[in-house]
């Protein structure tokens, strides 16, 4: 049964990929536009998913500890409902005002109704998602690996945005994507299945060890369990051979990011508090780089650092 389904899916992709192979520019174009549209949706996910989860956790908590109490009534709130609106004047955003990038440029970054500034983040996430999608398509070509790579890269954008805002990496995104990586590697899509499984296991364990070492010796914690799970996810997709990149690169990129962020918040916002730090985005950036350039980075490292 499963074999027949896989065969049918494979045949379908073969025919689509044959068409795209003939017209590669068309393929990149389609994927980039798709990236823009998905980016627009990811803005919604980044903003709404944490609120949805918070509501769900509260309800769960209450049902478990206070089953006799009635659950609070809430307006319907999910990724689709209510429709997008201006947070200032409640003006409902029409389809024409919701075209990725173009609408922001045409409206000059302001609400059509009340002139309230629209956050620069929306077009940024759209453009970023489009660019990353193009890179994935360019790297893997019209094959199953692109489809998987797109799902991974979109999830990383959503996770980074949520972690940046709320300092959480929701299991609701991490686990399905982790399992998907293992399933794709059953067909050796990015690495063999053994490397994939060890990538997940050691990805988690290495960060867990670093975390506890720091906590015991210095009494400090720079990351959380979400970061271990995200590293496990990336290990499952690209294999244990790239754990060096997945563990070391976020520390370097994160140090640069943190320094910039620290200067920014001291100079511009003048807060006395130390800025809260999200490590997830740096793991995500490193994971994406390892997905695209992993083999090159590894061989460069062996060459120049180890003289091999
Ligand atoms: Zn408005």
Image: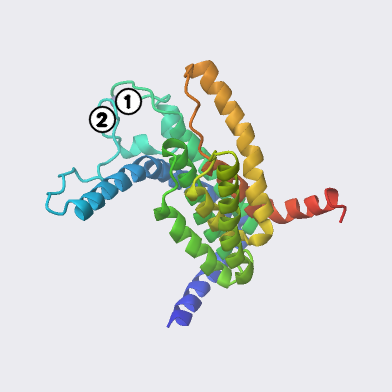
**In the depicted structure, whether residue 148 falls above or below residue 35:** below
Could you tell me which quadrant the C terminus lies in?
Answer: bottom right
The local secondary structure at tag 2 comes to loop
Other residues around mark 2 within 10 Å, as few (<14) / some (14–19) / many (≥20): some
In the rendered image, residue 124, in percent from the top left (x then y), is placed at 50, 34
Q: Nearer the viewer, mark 2 or mark 1?
A: 2
Q: Is residue 182 visible?
A: yes
Residue closest to the eye, 185 or 106: 185
The local secondary structure at tag 1 comes to loop
Residue closest to the eye, 95 or 192: 192
Precedes in sequence: disc 2 or disc 1: 2
* Ligand 1 under 8 Å from disc 1 Cβ: yes
In the rendered image, residue 60, in percent from the top left (x then y), is placed at 25, 52
Q: Is residue 38 left or right of residue 189?
A: left
Residue shown at 33%/20% (left/top)? 115
In the rendered image, residue 11, in percent from the top left (x then y), is placed at 52, 74
Q: On the image, numbered disc 1 is attached to which residue? A: 112
Q: On the image, numbered disc 2 is attached to which residue? A: 91
């Amino acid at each position: 049964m499963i074999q027949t389904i896989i065969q049918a899916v494979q045949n379908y992709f073969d025919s689509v990929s044959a068409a795209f192979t003939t017209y590669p520019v068309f393929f990149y174009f389609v994927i980039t536009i798709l990236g823009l549209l998905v980016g627009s949706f990811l803005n919604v996910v980044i903003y709404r998913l944490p609120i949805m989860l918070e509501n769900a956790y509260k309800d769960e908590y209450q049902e478990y500890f206070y089953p006799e109490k009635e659950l609070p009534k809430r307006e319907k709130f999910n990724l689709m409902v209510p429709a997008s609106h201006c947070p200032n004047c409640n003006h409902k955003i029409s389809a024409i005002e919701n075209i990725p990038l173009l609408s922001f440029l045409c409206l000059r970054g302001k609400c059509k109704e009340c002139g309230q500034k629209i956050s620069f983040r929306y077009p940024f996430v759209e453009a970023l998602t489009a660019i990353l999608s193009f890179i994935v398509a360019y790297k893997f070509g019209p094959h199953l690996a692109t489809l998987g790579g797109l799902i991974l890269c979109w999830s990383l954008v959503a996770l980074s945005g949520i972690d940046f805002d709320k300092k959480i990496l929701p299991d609701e995104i991490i686990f399905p994507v982790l399992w998907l990586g293992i399933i794709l590697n059953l067909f050796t899509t990015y690495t063999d299945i053994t490397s994939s499984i060890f990538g997940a296991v050691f990805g988690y364990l290495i960060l867990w060890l670093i975390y506890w070492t720091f906590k015991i010796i210095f009494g400090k914690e720079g990351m959380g369990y979400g970061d271990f799970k995200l590293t496990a996810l990336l290990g499952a997709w690209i294999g244990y051979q790239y754990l060096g990149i997945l563990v070391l690169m976020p520390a370097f990129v994160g140090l640069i990011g943190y320094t910039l962020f620290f200067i920014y918040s001291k100079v511009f916002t003048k807060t006395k508090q130390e800025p809260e730090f999200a490590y997830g985005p740096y793991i995500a950036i490193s994971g994406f780089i390892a997905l695209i350039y992993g083999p090159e980075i590894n061989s460069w490292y062996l060459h120049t650092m180890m003289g091999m």
